[in-house]
């Protein structure tokens, strides 16, 4: 590791659960941290409250130590809602005091609601924190619109989530729908906000027409017991499995087997699982919330339906399930789109270029 990192990145432990950790893990695998130009400090990890506190404290101590030794011209913070934001705010204000350049990288699809629900004084503090950034990165049009209102003087860019190079390498990623298992796949937390009940209801409609269909809902969360009971009520308990969280190898294998990847979320930013499915050749059916319409053009890269409308979601599932030509057209277009815009090597190189630009103080950055 170089003793003089150009940039210090603050984010979750790459081995933690969640979409932001998945992004960090891809950056690790792409070699972003290999040559010492970028140093990763994990400020969050899975485990007990005490373990999380220790992780955050160690990251803060390490960053303060780097600052005192004159290291790290750029701070890159990956931010979500709630504790994630306030934890990163401490790093941001340290960087402000030491006159470092700051990249505020917003991931959370629910961040706007989080800020708007704050008491007035906390909201003021949050706005002040964001406005001290030198570059805003975001994943969706709604987030971009809101950030431009909150911090109109700070340059803003849409930023693609990176997808590992190895997902594009399989020769089987674009197999015909008829060659794929009759498998509908969901990967993610089992939470009401993820639309998991709507998805299960839509699957029951799909199953009524296609009795060979199966659904895997891989993940964990408080909605598990309710979903299991709902599957019994709908008469599809034998066709639905809940394997819990699965590892990356099993996940990638399922994405290459599944006919369709479904996401019925009520709010999202730029879901990694959709990008991974598009790279692996699974057709995508999703709700049209948050940054998803920026990522997927309806009837070009996938099929979209309104949130909290199980009937509309089922209609789109049936279309792509039964129309092999449509399935193949969507899969091919999606694969090309992701390869051109989200390949990990391209995103890594663009990020390094951004760090150099900010560190050199070139036009397009500003400090209030």
Image (spheres, rainbow, N blue to C red):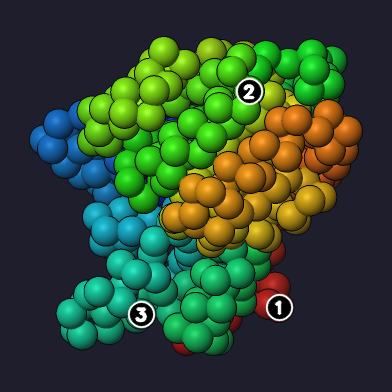
SS of the residue at dot 3?
helix
Give the answer, above or below, for where 131 lies relative to 303: below
Q: Position of residue 355 (x, y in %)?
A: 63, 56
Quadrant of residue 214 in the image? top right
Q: Please indicate whether residue 14 sits to the left or right of residue 7 in the image.
A: left
Mark found first going from the N terminus, 3 or 2: 3
Q: Nearer the viewer, mark 1 or mark 2?
A: 2
Which dot marks residue 127?
3
Q: Residues within 10 Å of mark 1 (few under 14, many from 20)?
A: few
- Of 120 and 53, the residue lying toward us: 120
Helix, strand or loop status at disc 1: loop
Q: Position of residue 142 (x, y in %)?
A: 54, 71
Within-10-Å neighbours for mark 3: few <14, some 14–19, many 20+:
some
Count of picture labels: 3
Which is more N-terminal, label 3 or label 1?
A: 3
Q: Position of residue 336 (x, y in %)?
A: 85, 40
Q: Which residue matches tag 2?
A: 210
Disc 1: which residue:
363
Q: Can I make out residue 281 in this image?
A: yes
- Work out how far the residue at label 3 is from the one at label 2, CA to CA, in angstroms: 51 Å
Q: Which mark lies nearer to you, 3 or 2?
A: 2
Give the residue at x 40% y 40%: 196
């Amino acid at each position: 590791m170089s003793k003089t990192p150009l940039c210090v990145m603050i984010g979750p432990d790459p081995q933690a659960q969640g979409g932001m950790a998945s992004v960090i893990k891809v950056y690790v695998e792409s070699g972003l941290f290999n040559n010492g130009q970028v140093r990763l400090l994990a400020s969050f990890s899975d485990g007990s409250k005490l373990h999380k506190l220790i992780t955050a404290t160690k990251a803060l101590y390490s960053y303060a130590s780097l600052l005192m030794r004159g290291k790290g011209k750029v701070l890159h913070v990956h931010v979500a809602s709630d504790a994630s934001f306030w934890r990163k705010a401490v790093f941001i204000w340290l960087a402000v005091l030491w006159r470092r350049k700051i990249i505020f990288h917003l991931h959370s699809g629910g961040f706007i609601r989080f800020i708007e629900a704050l008491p007035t004084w906390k909201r003021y503090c949050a706005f002040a924190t964001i406005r001290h950034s030198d570059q805003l990165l975001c994943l969706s049009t709604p987030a971009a619109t809101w950030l431009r209102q909150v911090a109109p003087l700070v340059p803003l860019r849409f930023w693609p989530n990176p997808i590992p190079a190895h997902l594009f390498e399989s020769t089987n990623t674009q197999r015909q729908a008829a060659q794929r298992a009759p498998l509908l796949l969901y990967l993610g937390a089992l939470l009401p906000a993820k639309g998991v009940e709507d998805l299960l209801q839509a699957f029951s409609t799909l199953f009524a027409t296609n009795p060979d269909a199966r659904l895997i809902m891989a993940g964990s969360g408080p909605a598990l017991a309710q979903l299991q009971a709902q599957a019994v009520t709908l008469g599809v308990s034998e066709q639905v499995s809940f394997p819990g969280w699965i590892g990356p190898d099993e996940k990638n294998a399922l994405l290459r087997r599944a006919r369709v990847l479904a996401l019925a979320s009520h709010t999202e930013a730029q879901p990694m699982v959709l990008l991974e499915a598009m790279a692996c050749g699974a057709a995508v059916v999703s709700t049209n919330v948050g940054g998803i319409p920026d990522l997927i053009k309806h009837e070009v890269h996938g099929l979209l339906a309104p949130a909290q409308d199980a009937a509309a979601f089922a209609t789109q599932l049936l279309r792509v399930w039964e129309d092999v030509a449509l399935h193949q057209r969507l899969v091919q277009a999606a694969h090309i789109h992701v390869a051109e815009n989200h390949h990990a090597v391209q995103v890594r190189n663009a990020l390094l270029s951004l760090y150099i630009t900010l560190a050199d103080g070139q036009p397009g950055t500003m400090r209030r």
